[in-house]
Amino acid sequence: MHITQLNRECLLHLFSFLDKNSRKSLAQTCQKLLEVFQDPFLWPVLNFHSPVELKKDNFLLGPTLRYLSICWHSSRVKVCNIEDWMKNTFQKDICHKHENTVNDFLIQVCNRCPNLLSLTLSGCGHVTDDYLLLLLKSCPNLKILKLENCVRITDQTLEAVILYGGSLQTLHVDFCRNITQAGLKTVQEKCPSIMLKAERSADMIPDNEPREKLMLERAVRKLVLH
């Protein structure tokens, strides 16, 4: 029996064992397999490990997507975790490209994946509060939000969780250096049902411009002297 003689249910099951590239390659062999590749029910889970993967055409975003993970820790991506004022021109160019890629992708998720249940972002130093606010509004069924080493995330994301995270059950904000203890406490008080985890976040040094740091040091000296 040729593979194309199998019914749609069997083909979807077979495709489910393949990675994104293998699915795309198989879909290019005939129209029937292309239709299987384009079936939204094939794509309830998506995992990405580099910004380049987000720009490929080897996956499908649709209303059946339930679990999404974007995690990377390459040396180039780590550059995006450096404070902006410390980056050289080359580093800023890399970060700008990554930022556009990730944010464009998240907008597509907001527009196409209203039934998303779980989102994990790790090492995404370019994701901002605005896009997470939009995502919380667009995906009202979101139950799990895990953010790790997302350095541009602030207490504004925590405020968005309080306002729009009505279905949220689990929230992780690990190693997010611009999250404060006050913001975490507010989430605990207003959303006691959420399982909140914030490893090291409120204990890390937040971003400050050199001038801000200098002014802070002077203020501390004045307090000590008086």
Image (cartoon, grey):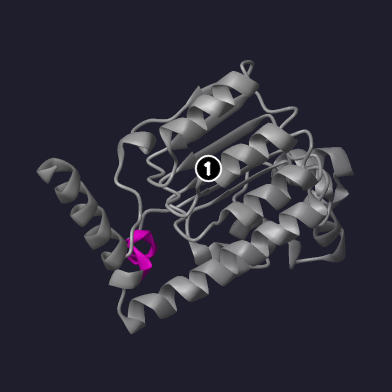
| Magenta-drawn stretch, dominant element (helix, strand or loop) | helix
Q: Is residue 70 left or right of residue 164?
A: left
Q: Which residues are magenta?
A: 75-84
Give the answer, above or below, for where 142 lies relative to 217. Answer: above
Residue 95 sits in quarter: bottom left
Task: Answer yes or no: is residue 2 visible.
Answer: no
Read off the residue under disc 1.
155
Q: Residue furthest left?
A: 225
> How far from the left and from the top, in percent, is residue 162?
67, 32
x 42%, y 75%: residue: 94
x 58%, y 68%: residue: 101
x 73%, y 46%: residue: 43
Q: Residue furthest front?
A: 226
Q: Is residue 59 left or right of residue 205?
A: right
> How far from the left and from the top, in percent, is residue 88?
30, 79
Q: Residue furthest bottom?
A: 89
19 and 6: which is toward the camera: 19
Task: Answer yes or no: is residue 189 visible.
Answer: yes
70 and 177: which is toward the camera: 177
Q: Is residue 222 magenta?
A: no
- Mark 1 belongs to which amino acid? Asp
29 and 192: which is toward the camera: 192
At mark 1, the secondary structure is: helix
**Dot 1 alpha-carbon crowd within 10 angstroms: few under 14, some 14 to 19, many 20 or more:** some
